[in-house]
Amino acid sequence: MTDPADSSPHRARPRPLAGWRRLPALGQDAILAAIAWLIMVLLPALDTLTQVTGQPAPGPWSPGDLALHLIVVSCLCAPLLARRRFPILTMLAIAAVIVLAAILGLPTFRGGVPVLIGFVAATSAAYYRRGWWRLALAVTIVGCTVAFGWIDDRAPAASDVLMVLATSLLPVTLGWMLRVQRDRAQELVQLREATHRRIRAEDHTRIAREVHDSVGHHLSSIRLRAVGALADRSSPTDVPLQSIADTSAVALGEIRRLLDLLRADVPAPPVPVADIRALARDASDQQRAVTVEVDRACPESVPHDAFRVIQESVTNVIRHSDASTARIGLAADDGTLVVTVDDDGTARPGTAITPGFGLPGMAQRVHRTGGAFFAGPRAPHGWSVRAAFTLPSAAAP
């Protein structure tokens, strides 16, 4: 029986070049040099076997000719081992061997394989070196081609000049194109990784902001109730304990709802204005009164980010302010919701601001929706937070 997984269209298929790419760079170059060496060594024997009938057969090689042939072939293929680390020296060494073999008249040029080896070396040099090096490569190849013509004692024709230019530019152009393709592939990989990092960072920031604004507010309220009960031991503890229990239940429900939203990765729904009034009632106590003023044009529900800004602002009043009153204002005008939270604390204009996590988080919430945000001391004294949000109905075309 066949394995069902073998017929699955999503099964990973083996890649033909996967094994080759797993080899180290020196191993790949060693295999390339060995293949070129074998072809160059066996090429005379292949010429003898494929000799056309009627043509004179080449004479047998003497031991000295064979040894010289092996030395030249080894000198021609050995530089390929350094074609990545020293591409320019590799090409110059191979070009020198080719010119020397042509001057000595060695039978190394059967089939033009040395020229192909020089082509590989020139392409590698253009791939691994940039800038003026490519121009130097083209000039070197032109010089080698002219040297061959001088050795053969031939006067170049117009077509020969065109062929020289084409031969000179082809390996340089090919190496440049391969390098451009590789650089673009690396840029795409880097861009994809940067995009993934940015998305993860945005997700982490969003989670931290939600946890800070929601859980932090409820924990501050619980601490406020507990501190009040400890400060006034003469009063019964039933009321503060019940308030702490109620706030804890609300906090747990808020955490569950937050986790559900994060798992589903869906935008949070609008928050009713009644929840803002309840928030103000929970934040009010004997030391502080929090009120809510709602404009008639204000909708019955506000965006989730607007509620979080109000919640964080009230939390800051509880934690950091000595204000006795705080006012939450909601006003709608021409499709824009303006949220204000003002208190009568001792902060005055010009007071140094040391932002923590709350202020940047509120600014991020407002700015990502295209709104405006301000937070700072107000005249004559106190703290003010103002944020403008575009209502969904106005954003629709």
Image (tube, helix red, strand yellow):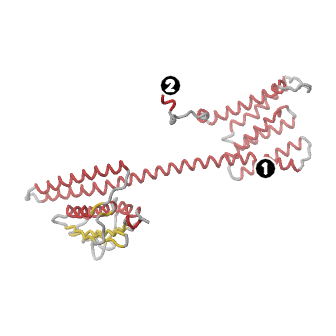
Which of the two residues, 169 or 25, is positioned nearer the viewer here? Answer: 169
Is residue 292 visible to the viewer in this orientation of the structure? Answer: yes
> 81 above or below 160?
above
Q: Which dot, 1 or 2, sits closer to the camera? A: 2
Q: Are marks 1 and 2 in contact (CB under 8 Å)?
A: no
| Location of residue 270 in the rendering, given as x and y in whole percent from the top left corner | 32, 60
Give the SS element for disc 1: helix
Position of 319 with respect to 66 (left or right) is left
Task: Tell me the number on the disc at residue 179.
Answer: none
| Location of residue 160 in the rendering, given as x and y in whole percent from the top left corner | 86, 47
What amino acid type should be assigned to the residue bearing mark 1?
Answer: Val
The residue shown at (87%, 48%) is 159
**Nearer the N terminus, badge 1 or badge 2?**
2
> 100 above or below 386?
above
Q: Which residue is mark 1?
A: 139
Position of 246 with respect to 79 (left or right) is left
Is residue 345 visible to the viewer in this orientation of the structure? Answer: no
Quadrant of res 354: bottom left
Which of the two residues, 180 or 64, is positioned nearer the viewer here? Answer: 180
Quadrant of res 373: bottom left
Which of the two residues, 217 or 231, is positioned nearer the viewer here? Answer: 217
**Marks 1 and 2, Cα distance to the nearest angstrom?**
60 Å
The residue shown at (28%, 77%) is 380
* Category of crowding for the residue at label 2, using alpha-carbon neighbours closer than 10 angstroms: few (below 14), some (14–19), many (at least 20): few
What amino acid type should be assigned to the residue bearing mark 2?
Answer: Thr
The residue shown at (36%, 60%) is 361
| Location of residue 260 in the rendering, given as x and y in whole percent from the top left corner | 32, 49
Q: Which residue is mark 2?
A: 2
* Category of crowding for the residue at label 1, using alpha-carbon neighbours closer than 10 angstroms: few (below 14), some (14–19), many (at least 20): some
| Location of residue 253 in the rendering, given as x and y in whole percent from the top left corner | 25, 51
